[in-house]
Image (cartoon, rainbow, N blue to C red):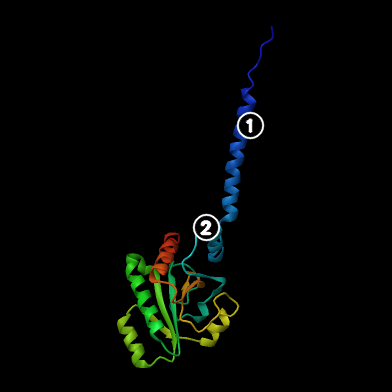
Amino acid sequence: MSEVKPAGGSGAKIQIIIMLAMVIGATVLGTVMLPKNEQERAELMALLGTTNMGTLITPTVNWVPLLPPGEDISDDINGHYRVVLVADGSCDSGCAEMIATTRAVEVRLGRDARRVDRVLLQTGLAAAELDQLAVDNPDLVIAPLDGAALAALLAPTSAALTGANRFYLINPVGDAVLYYDQSHTGSDLLEDLKHLLKYSPSR
C-alpha cells in the first residue's frame, strides 16, 4: 500500500510568499508616498483625509526674497516656522486683531513657541504706531514690505491678493503653505502649528 504524503507543505509555502509580497509591497508604497517637500506632504495629508485648518496655498511659493535679514533662511537647519502678517499702507482693526491673535497663539504654544517666528511686513505705518507695536509685541520682527513684489509672488497662486486682511504660514524652507483670513480663529492656527511642529523635528 503506497504512502500518502501530506499536502500541507505547498500551502504553507504559498502563505509565506503572500506574506513576503505584502511586506515588500508596503515598504515600496511607503517609499513612493514619502513626501519630498511641504506641498507633497500637504497633498498626501489631504489624500489620507487629514485637513488643514488654514487655506492651502497652491502652488506653494517661496517668500525668502521678501523676508528681512535673519528670517530669510532658505534651509530648515533651525526647524523654524514663520507666521507672516502684512500691513500695506495701514494696520486697521482687522490687522491689529490678527497681530493680537497670533501673539495669543504664540503664548499657547508654550516652549514650542521658540520654533515659531512672527514677522510683520509693513509699509506706510507711522513711526509712533511702529513704536507701539514693538512695545506690545517685543518678539515681533517688523520689516519693510515690498507690496508690488508680494502681489506678483502671490498672483499665480490660490492666495492672490484681494485686499482682505490675511496672515501666512511659512515653512522652514521659506515656502508659504497656508494662509488665514478673518474667517479663521486663533485655534485654527494653533492646531495647524501643533500638527506641523509634531512632525517637523526640532534641530
- Where is the C terminus found, in terms of image quarters? bottom left
Q: Residue at 47% across / 67% down in the picture?
A: 76
Residue 154: % across, % down: 56, 79
Point out the residue furthest to the front here. 183
Q: What crowding class fits label 1: few (fewer than 14 Cα within 10 Å), some (14-19), or many (20 or more)?
A: few
Res 127 → quadrant: bottom left
Please tell me which residue is depicted at 62% across the width and 40% down the height of the picture. Answer: 21
Residue drawn at point x = 63 percent, y = 18 percent:
6
Q: Residues within 10 Å of mark 2 (few under 14, many from 20)?
A: few
Decide if residue 112 is on the left or right side of residue 52.
left
Residue 149: name its quadrant: bottom right
Tag 1 or tag 2, which sits nearer the N-term?
1
- Compared to 26, does 159 lie above or below? below
The residue lying toward the viewer, choosing from 178 and 141, is: 178
Q: CA distance from mark 2 to mark 1?
A: 35 Å
Q: Secondary structure at mark 2?
A: loop
Q: Nearer the viewer, mark 2 or mark 1?
A: 2
Query: Picture coordinates of residue 172 (x, y %)?
Result: 47, 69
The residue at which mark 1 appears reads as 14
Task: State the residue in front, 44 or 173.
Answer: 44
Residue 92 to residue 63: above or below: below
Q: Secondary structure at mark 1?
A: helix
* Residue 8 spot, x, y in % from top left: 61, 23
Horizontal side of residue 4 vs 128, given as left or right: right
> Residue 135: which disc?
none
The three-letter code of the residue at mark 1 reads: Ile
In the picture, the quarter occupied by the N terminus is top right
105 over 148 or under it: above or below: above
In this figure, which residue is indicated by the disc labeled 2?
49
- Give the amino acid type for the residue marked by disc 2 in the picture: Gly
- Farthest left residue in view: 135
Query: In the image, residue 113 lies at what x, y percent?
Result: 36, 68
